[in-house]
Each structure stands twice: as structure tokens, then as C-alpha cells.
Image (tube, grey):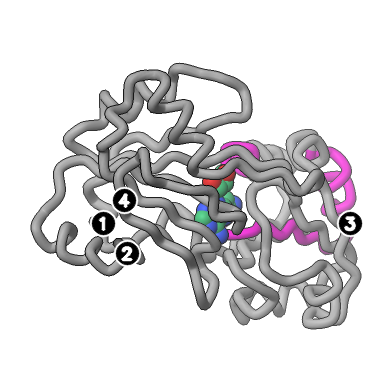
């Protein structure tokens, strides 16, 4: 059996009851270490689950063979920070599990894709999501321009195993160098899903490093007056 379980964005207690039951009945529990960073440690998770948890990188999940092989005879859980399907690699694993005729459980949870609702921006008014990578690319600025008048969520590159996270200020400097008006209003979010997320609404040129991770950046499109009023909370 293969269980792919979203464990939420914050700490060990964000797992659902169904997810926890499946974890308790698992022979092997893997935790991905490349899409986000929890505010608790691996030890906190192991203590709460009363189970050993094996940290795995992108290559292990993308390959998937070890999990699929084990899941033919044993109970295997892959834990995803946030939600299960917020990255394409996990759909490939699901497809491989379907092809192998495994018994599969998918347990959803909150993702950054809906946690951004806390900004007051309507989730229905977002265009295509873009990723700003450590490597230079013109794609994000194009996506932002093409999305207008819709909002754009920019995911910011991260390498948790090296404790390396992109600052929104760094991403903004790149976008400005590629033609974003420095006076564009942006929303910077850090540690969404936690008790004290940081949310800042300001002109792009005024965004400073937060030193708090992970972060994402929103470039709003046209604002409804209710969205505009709510964003005042974050000035
Ligand atoms: C592929 S997305 C998906 C993350 C996660 N698996 C999920 O379901 O939300 C990864 C990007 O989300 C953003 N991110 C992840 N966790 C975050 C958090 N708690 N607060 C703000 N942004 C976050 C970062 O920009 C990161 O590069």
C-alpha cells in the first residue's frame, strides 16, 4: 500500500486524523525535503508520530522505484509538506503507483496555493503561477505581464538541505532589472500556515530582506476595493 500524505505547512500537528492513522500503520515513512520547510524538526515529527521518519530528496521521489517496490508488500507512506499535488513530481509517483496496481491512499492538506488566501486576495483572481529560480530567467516577468489583470503568485526557489532560501527582495531586484516598475505594489508572504506568518504589502522597491523562510511573492493585478481594503492590514 502507498499512502501519499499532505502534512500541512507548519508543524507536526497539522497532519489530519486520517493521515496520522495511516502513518501509524506504516512500515516505512518518508518525508520530502525540497518543497518547503516546517517550523518543527524531524525529531518533533518522529516523537509526535511515534515512528521513524526518513528524510528524502527530490531525486528519490522522482525516481520512486524504491517506494513503489516496497509498497507491493508493505505499507509505505510518503509525507509531503503542504499538500500532495502542489508539485508535478507527486503526480508522476501517483501515476507509477496506479500503473503498478497498488492500493493507494491520497490525503490532502493545506498548501501555499490556498494559504495565500490570508492576504485577502481572491483565490479566484489568480493567473498562472510562476517560479523564480536561483538561476536567471525571463519567464516570471513574462508570466506576471501576461497574467494582468489577474494576480500572480511567484514561488521562490529553495534548497532546504543546504538551508538556502530565496528572499522576496532578491526576486524583486531581478524582476525590476527585467522591467517591473519599482513602484508596483507587491505582497510578500513568509511562513504561511504558522501562527505568526509575515505578510507585507508595499511598493516593490521598498521590500527588505525578511530573514524568515520560506517566502513567496504575489504581484497583484487589478484589485477589487475589498481586496484593497484588506491589504491595508499589511502596510
Ligand atoms: C512547489 S511549492 C509547494 C510547497 C508545498 N508542497 C505546498 O503544498 O504548499 C514551493 C514554494 O512554495 C513557497 N512556500 C512553501 N511553503 C511556504 C510557506 N509556509 N510560506 C510561504 N511560502 C511557502 C516557496 O516559495 C516555495 O518555493
Instruction: Tell which circle, 1 or 4, labels the residue nearer the N-terminal end.
Output: 1
User: Which quadrant is the N terminus positioned in?
Assistant: bottom right
- Whether tag 1 and tag 2 are in contact, CB under 8 A, the answer is no
User: Which comes sooner in the sequence, label 2 or label 3?
Assistant: 3
Q: Position of residue 11 (x, y in %)?
A: 66, 73
At 49% from the left and 35% from the top, the residue drawn is 171
Question: What's the distance in space between the residues labelled 4 and 2, CA to CA?
Answer: 8 Å
Residue 205 visible in this rendered orientation of the protein:
yes
The label shown at residue 202 is 4
Q: Which stretch did the figure color magenta? A: 64-91
Residue 232 placement (x, y as % from top left): 22, 64
Q: Which residue is depicted at the point 42% across and 46% down?
A: 207
Q: Which mark is residue 234?
A: 2
Query: Element at badge 2?
Result: helix
- Left or right: residue 173 versus residue 212 is left
| SS of the residue under disc 1 | loop
Q: How many marks?
A: 4
User: Mark 3 packing: few (<14 Cα in 10 Å), some, or many (20+)?
Assistant: few
Which circle marks residue 5 in the picture?
none
Residue 97 can be seen in this image: no
Amino acid at each position: 500500500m502507498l499512502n501519499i500524505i499532505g502534512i500541512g505547512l507548519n508543524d507536526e500537528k497539522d497532519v489530519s486524523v486520517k493521515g496520522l492513522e495511516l502513518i501509524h500503520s506504516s512500515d516505512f515513512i518518508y518525508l520530502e525535503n525540497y518543497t518547503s520547510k516546517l517550523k518543527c524538526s524531524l525529531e518533533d515529527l518522529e516523537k509526535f508520530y511515534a515512528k521513524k521518519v526518513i528524510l528524502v530528496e527530490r531525486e528519490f521521489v522522482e525516481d520512486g522505484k524504491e517506494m513503489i517496490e516496497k509498497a507491493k508488500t508493505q505499507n509505505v507512506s510518503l509525507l509531503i509538506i503542504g499538500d500532495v499535488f502542489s508539485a508535478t513530481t507527486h503526480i508522476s509517483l501517483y501515476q507509477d503507483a496506479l500503473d503498478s496496481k497498488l492500493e493507494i491512499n491520497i490525503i490532502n492538506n493545506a498548501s501555499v496555493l490556498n494559504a495565500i488566501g490570508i492576504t485577502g486576495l481572491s483565490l479566484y483572481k489568480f493567473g498562472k503561477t510562476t517560479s523564480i529560480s536561483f538561476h536567471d530567467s525571463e519567464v516570471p516577468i513574462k508570466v506576471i505581464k501576461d497574467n494582468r489583470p489577474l494576480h500572480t503568485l511567484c514561488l521562490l526557489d529553495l534548497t532546504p538541505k543546504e538551508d538556502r532560501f530565496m528572499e522576496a527582495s532578491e526576486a524583486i531586484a531581478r524582476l525590476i532589472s527585467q522591467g517591473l516598475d519599482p513602484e508596483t505594489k507587491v505582497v510578500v508572504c513568509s511562513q504561511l500556515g504558522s501562527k505568526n506568518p509575515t505578510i507585507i504589502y508595499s511598493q516593490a522597491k521598498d521590500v527588505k530582506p525578511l530573514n524568515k523562510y520560506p517566502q513567496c511573492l504575489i504581484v497583484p493585478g487589478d484589485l477589487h476595493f475589498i481586496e484593497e481594503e484588506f491589504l491595508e492590514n499589511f502596510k
